[in-house]
Image: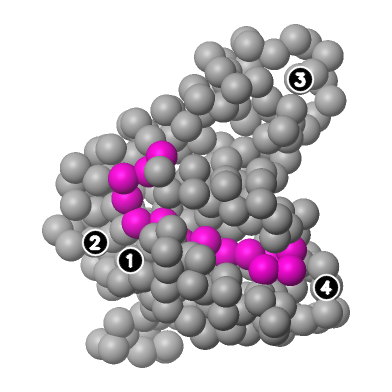
Amino acid sequence: MGFEGLPDSVSKGQALAAFKQAAQMRSPEARLRYYAQVFPIVEVDSTYYALPSEQNARLWAERTPPGFVFNIKAFGLLTQHPVDPRRLPDVIRERFPRDVLEKGRLYHAGVPTDVRELVWTMHIEALRPLADAGKLGCLLFQFPHWFSKNRASVDYLREVRERLPWPIAVEFRGGGWMEAERQSRMLKLLEEIGLAYISVDEPQGFPSSTLPVVACTSELAVLRLHGHNAETGEKSIITAGGCTC
């Protein structure tokens, strides 16, 4: 889980103390319960690496107070990143031949339509306990730099919006979406589709870099802070967490 925007009542020192205290707790339940006493929101990043679990979503809802919010990072296959087939549920893995699974990576374009539909269904159903409890904030779709600005990509953004009944925020990692001459058109497009644009502060000069454009395209405004550690190049952008305000 990534740590998100601090409420006005929590200072930086208090936040650091809370992180240290939580790190000393052995069980995930204890850490979450303690965290939820200090902060009102969290970003779940583990769901990018593996499909969310309905059981986990139910436990998250039960272990946090009323009003606590979970922002969920969408599963990598749905953001067109490669995924490790070993992290897939058996019901999905069994639909692939062994030689495909042994390649080590699965890409969205190489996944049969019926399997994609199953992934979407499992992703949505797993999050319903959070939504039913009023604790699901938004789904965060972080697209790779090869998700470039073209008709197919725009169609996919529309598909994502049509499939999900909850707020959606999108983050572009390069791809030409926010080049200076396109910014106005792209922001209007996101507003038309009904997607929240994620403003980012991150190292520049890499294929996955996006200009630091501050914009609001829906009722939800999202800012993610990735830091300025250019020495590690794209790794700092790809692996960094975010701060959502």
Specify whether 14 is left or right of 169. Answer: left
* Position in image of residue 89 (x %, y %): 55, 22
Relative height, residue 177 to residue 85 (above, below) = below
The answer to whether one can see residue 145 in this image is yes
Report the amino acid beneath label 2: Phe
Relative height, residue 167 to residue 92 (above, below) = below
| Residue sitting at x 49%, y 72% | 188
Q: Nearer the viewer, mark 4 or mark 2?
A: 4
Tag 4–tag 2 contact (CB < 8 Å): no
Q: Over which residues does the magenta segment extend?
A: 163-177
Q: Nearer the viewer, mark 2 or mark 3?
A: 3
Looking at this view, is 167 or 237 the one in front? 167
Specify whether 43 is left or right of 183. Answer: left
Which residue position is annotated with label 3?
A: 101
Q: Quadrant of the C terminus?
A: bottom left
Question: Circle 3 — which element?
Answer: helix
Which residue position is annotated with label 4?
A: 206
Specify whether 105 is left or right of 72. Answer: right
Which residue position is annotated with label 1?
A: 41
Report the coloring of the rendering.
Answer: one colour
Q: Residues within 10 Å of mark 1 (few under 14, many from 20)?
A: many
